[in-house]
Image: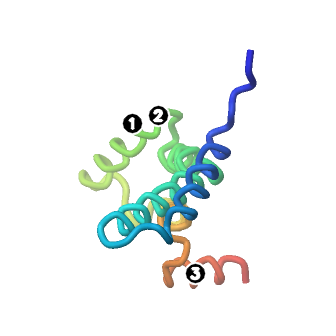
Amino acid sequence: MAEQIEATTLIEAVQLFLAELESELSGRRAFHAKVAQNALAIVARELAQAPQAREQALLAGVMGQDDSLDTLRANLCADLRDGRKGETTPGLIDALLAIAQARCAVDNPRYSTFKRLAASATA
């Protein structure tokens, strides 16, 4: 049986293919190829960084419960809406900031605010 190819290897192969095609495309097709390259870059960063696992761990800590990420998000929203949690909840602001930074690191690591926050976190 053939060895299974890792998702990141497949992504890299398609990115390389699109990069090679780039000079041959123009107009709408060139634009769509660039969008596809950007989407693949996001997927590659998501696989490499696994931000959802970190988000789940952070929210579980704030919520004091071990549930699925969807359940933790829904419960946090309900608690915020009903006033049971807020800016004075221990660890909440730090957790939300870390989650937002992780999301930016995946979605758009060149975003200037993300760069500034990431630099201040390491300083």
Secondary structure of the residue carrying numbered label 1: helix
Q: Residue at x 37, y 72 (%)?
A: 26
Q: Residue at x 51, y 58 (%)?
A: 42
Q: Position of residue 112 (x, y in %)?
A: 50, 84
Q: CA distance from mark 2 to mark 1?
A: 5 Å
Quadrant of res 94: bottom right
Secondary structure of the residue carrying numbered label 3: helix
- Residue at numbered disc 2: 68
Q: Position of residue 29 (x, y in %)?
A: 34, 63
- Residue at numbered disc 1: 71
Of residue 31 and residue 104, the one placed in the foreground of this image is: 31
Q: Residue furthest front?
A: 24
> Which comes sooner in the sequence, label 3 or label 1?
1
Few, some or many residues within 10 Å of mark 2 (<14, 14–19, 20+): some
Q: Residue at x 57, y 85 (%)?
A: 116
Q: CA distance from mark 3 to mark 2?
A: 30 Å
How was this image coloured?
Answer: rainbow
Q: Residue at x 47, y 34 (%)?
A: 68
Q: Position of 114 compared to 79: left or right?
A: right
Is disc 3 in contact with disc 1, using a CB cutoff of under 8 Å? no
Few, some or many residues within 10 Å of mark 1 (<14, 14–19, 20+): few
